[in-house]
Amino acid sequence: MSHTWKFFLAGGFDQVRIDTAADLVNLRNLDQKLWVALSCPTTGVEFDARTLALLDSDNDGHIRAPELLAAIDWAAARLNDSKVFEQKLGGVPLGAIKDEAIAAVARGLLKDGETLVTVEAASAAEAEYSARALAAWEAGGAAARPLGDATEAACGALAAVKEKLDDFFVRCRLAAFDARAEDAMNASDDSLKALGGAALNNGHAEIAALPLAKVGAGATVPLGAGIDSGINPAWAERIGTFREAVVVPLLGARPGLSESDWLAVQDQLAVYGAWQAAKPAGLPPEAEAVRDLERLARYVRDLLTLANNFVAFRDFYTRQGKATFQIGTLYLDGRAAELVISVNDAGKHAALAGLSRICLVYCDCVRPGAKQTIAAAFTAGDSDQLMVGRNGVFYDRQGRDWDATITKIVDHPISLRQAFWSPYKKLARMVAEQLQKLAASKASAVEGKLAEAATSAVKKVEAPAAKPPAQQAFDVGKFAGIFAAIGLAVGALGTAAASVVTGMLGLKWWQMPLVVVGLMLLISGPSVIVAWFKLHSRTLGPILDANGWAVNARARINIPFGTSLTQMAKLPEGAERSLTDPYAEKQRPWKTYGFIALAIFIALAWWTR
């Protein structure tokens, strides 16, 4: 039957609404081109690890669309009423279970008056059955180990020679069947001659391929030691180990191993192999329903939530909760960044995540006995005080606090306001740096001259008879040229300033603000335009793709939504604020003086035209 789908617009694209059990059950019929993601990792996400492990049927560390759909089908087939998916229960109600084997186990777990099998109760039952099965298996181990603790080593020694011993006794049977076969079953003259021209050792493959010992009707495998034992040299060491670990403990010392002896030792150790094969991997077959009950309880509780963080990113874009990839909140530089994900390698992650056009701050987070790396998106404010080495505090989804230190920054525009003022801030920084360099250079020169003067004075004291060096004559022309150049520079600056002021005075009063605004736009315009394009192309996809997701949509993060992902510091509503700062720097009226001087200059220029 056809299903009517509902969609909501978020992130610049349509996302499917998965509100009801019918929506969940019919996901198989929804075109996967409309899914937000087609794969997500089982680590680095805030979701029940056991549920993800059950969903990951191929154990490759990723949940893919077919695995999610298979889990939905599996659970729906074992329920009387799939509406329990949408009831946000902590497990599965007894009355909703359709499978009789699972229902029987559920009835055994519930107490009088209880109707809901919680995930915790089902998981505890699974663990109890697993422990009980393991204990029963271990109890049978004593009878399955004829040699005690040495049984495992004996089985290994037997397995190492089994194929070669089987081959030997089959050859002997053929020799007993027909006397003509005896020569053919032993090493031929040609095979031995071929070995004569080769460099040989005990591990040579062609030697190992020769029969284990001299083949004959009713022959036995020699068990003696030494080079004249009659055993193929390539197998002598392994047969010796087999003799000491298996034959002697089980049959006693003997010169050779007959076929009946060989069958006897295999029979005595076969019970150990059967016991090992019966080791329970989880639950015994009769208790498989217990495992299915745990799976069903988890799927009823978790599948709708997972679908809304996989097929759609509802929790992320509606801001009604945290998405599975949001692992906590980073507090740093007076802001709280809520789009924080876990990363394994900051360098590799940044190589792809930088395409998101989002300002990302990578931090190493530590707390006693634990360490992790995170990437936090800063989408409000500015990046002036974000720098490698700054410290903050990261709170994970369990409320634990971690010491966070910035290790890497992927810089992108955070806001249009930052982009507007960026050229002026860069100019201010450049001027400040140049002034600092100039001051440092002058200070160094002065210090050098002082040191030179001190050295010269010491030399004069130590050698008073020495003839003082001739002083260089004062070059009037040289200094006149320097002063002339300085005068020209000052004059040029004054002329330029006068031209600007004269031009401004030639305008009408209402044109002056427009000129100022135009000049500011000329300076800030390019930065704002570049920032506008980057802010309108921000996307979540590369950040998650770099972490193992397969994002299937252009999950945009526009300016209003991005601003909501980073909370700025603000005073509480109704808070009282004192504007008096007892440690404020003393204000001097230089700005007032400068404004008055400028006003007088403009008035004189206007008066004299």
Image (cartoon, rainbow, N blue to C red):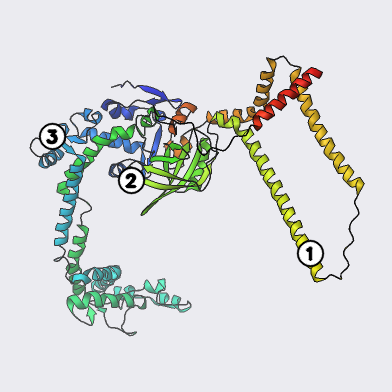
**C-alpha span from label 1 to label 2:** 87 Å
Compared across the picture, whether 288 is left or right of 512 comes to left
- Residue receiving disc 3: 115
Mark found first going from the N terminus, 1 or 2: 2
Instruction: Tell us which disc is closer to us: 1 or 3.
Output: 1
The answer to whether one can see residue 507 in this image is: yes
**C-alpha span from label 3 to label 2:** 33 Å
**C-alpha span from label 1 to label 3:** 102 Å
Which quadrant does the C terminus fall into?
top right
The answer to whether one can see residue 170 in this image is: no
Q: Nearer the viewer, residue 101 or 106?
A: 106
x and y percent of residue 132 in the render? 15, 54
Query: On screen, 127 above or below 536?
Result: below
- Residue receiving disc 1: 457
Per the image, label 1 sits on a secondary structure element best described as helix
- Residue receiving disc 2: 58
Compared across the picture, whether 121 is left or right of 22 comes to left
